[in-house]
Amino acid sequence: MTMRQDYPAVQTLLQQATLDTSLKSIAEKILRKERITPEDGLTLFEKGDIGFLGALANHVRERMHGDKTYFNRNFHIEPTNVCVFTCHFCSYSRLYKNREEGWELSIDQMLDIVKKYDNQPVTEVHIVGGVHPKMQLDFFVELIQKIKAHRPDLHIKGFTAVELDYMFRKAKVSLEEGMRILNEAGLQSMPGGGAEIFHPDVRAKICHDKVDGDGWLAIHRAAHNQGMTTNATMLYGHVETYAHRIDHMEQLRQLQDETHGFNTFIPLKFRNKGNDMSDIPETSIVEDLKLYAVARLYMDNFPHLKAYWPMLGRNTAQLTLSFGVNDLDGTIDDTTKIYSMAGAEEQNPSMNTAQLAHLIKQAGRRPVERDTVYNEIKDYTDVVFSEEELLTK
Ligand code: V47
Ligand code: SF4
């Protein structure tokens, strides 16, 4: 496979006599590598059809990454699903008063999970869970130190801004101080969860009691200033409007201009099973693909756009690779329960490396294993897998 040198799809689009003039001028900006405005972003959502958006987003994706599609080998630890907050979209958490219905892992139990991977080539542990009132900063410092003592080469990516906001407030430390303590203990980066939609009107409806948008951004800024990299998410497809999505992406784009600390933007499709928002229908695949494409076009300073396949399903995830996505998360033993409990197709979200690389190749892309900060570990393009490797877990 070679990187495509010309972009006939985009050129053909621009020559169409029927193309809306505002869409044409946005496409021309993108071809000139100019930043698009919030109004342009809205126009793309409102007027861009899937063919137009896909061709443009794919152009940008290939300009940035060619055919490379990254994946990493990680596993998750979810310390607890007990949570003091009451996000209406959440199918996963249990309130403290109902904690016997949930789980609470001790440090030793979490170390046992780490030890299960002792002879496996995983490069990252992703630690994220509910906000438990009794699991505090000291507890997590000890956990991180013990994981690092056991396996120093394992990259620790952990804790959403929601968990950290609560942890730091309970410990009465500033964001900067809290971030320094965790970083010195061995925390190297942060996942992007808890962002949802920043706009206060939406937050009031779906997650009124946890950290607000400014607070989320302040924690990521503090992490970036501490030299850590982080990800950003956006939970879409519920009560938000296109304008709310653009506002969310704009705030992230501005922070990225300031710090350059974000690696990856991860849109998360709202899944409606087993939560208080089950009456809201889920978005169609066409709407999902359009969102990925607009995200690739709008987030021009985010190096990577990731599809989280355990939540989207393998088939849609494969399609996103033609709509701007250059990273598929979740390979071996991706042990999260967040999405299976919300009704995602993938009830056992686990693929071996051969299966994931094969999925990427089937979509005409080059599978490249990366570490958390996108150092390339191995290009699997020319690796031939056996039937057995493709069939076994
Ligand atoms: O913040 C919760 C989302 C997030 C539902 O940074 C839901 O590499 C859809 O952020 N339907 C946590 N989404 C997970 C997360 C994540 C996942 C993978 C990789 C990374 C990364 C981060 O899950 C929450 C929330 O937005 N979520 N419930 C639901 N019903
Ligand atoms: Fe708690 Fe996170 Fe669920 Fe909100 S989404 S209730 S913060 S576990």
Image (cartoon, rainbow, N blue to C red):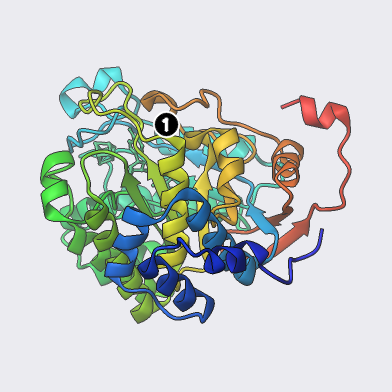
Vertical position of residue 25 compared to residue 337: above or below: below
Please tell me which residue is depicted at 70% across the width and 60% down the height of the picture: 67
Residue 45: x and y in percent read 34, 55
Residue at disc 1, CB closer than 8 Å to ligand 1 = yes
Between 238 and 100, which is closer to the camera in this rendering? 238
Residue 382: x and y in percent read 87, 52
Please tell me which residue is depicted at 78% across the width and 25% down the height of the picture: 391
Between 173 and 250, which is closer to the camera in this rendering? 250
For ligand 1, give the image quadrant.
top left
Vertical position of residue 54 compared to residue 112: above or below: below
Q: Is residue 361 left or right of residue 222?
A: right
Query: In which quarter of the view is residue 40 placed?
Result: bottom left
Between 150 and 39, which is closer to the camera in this rendering? 39
The residue tagged 1 is 339
Instruction: Determine whether the residue tagged by mark 1 lies in a helix, strand or loop.
Output: loop
Q: Is residue 293 left or right of residue 175?
A: right
Which quarter of the rendering shows the C terminus?
top right
Q: Is residue 38 visible?
A: yes
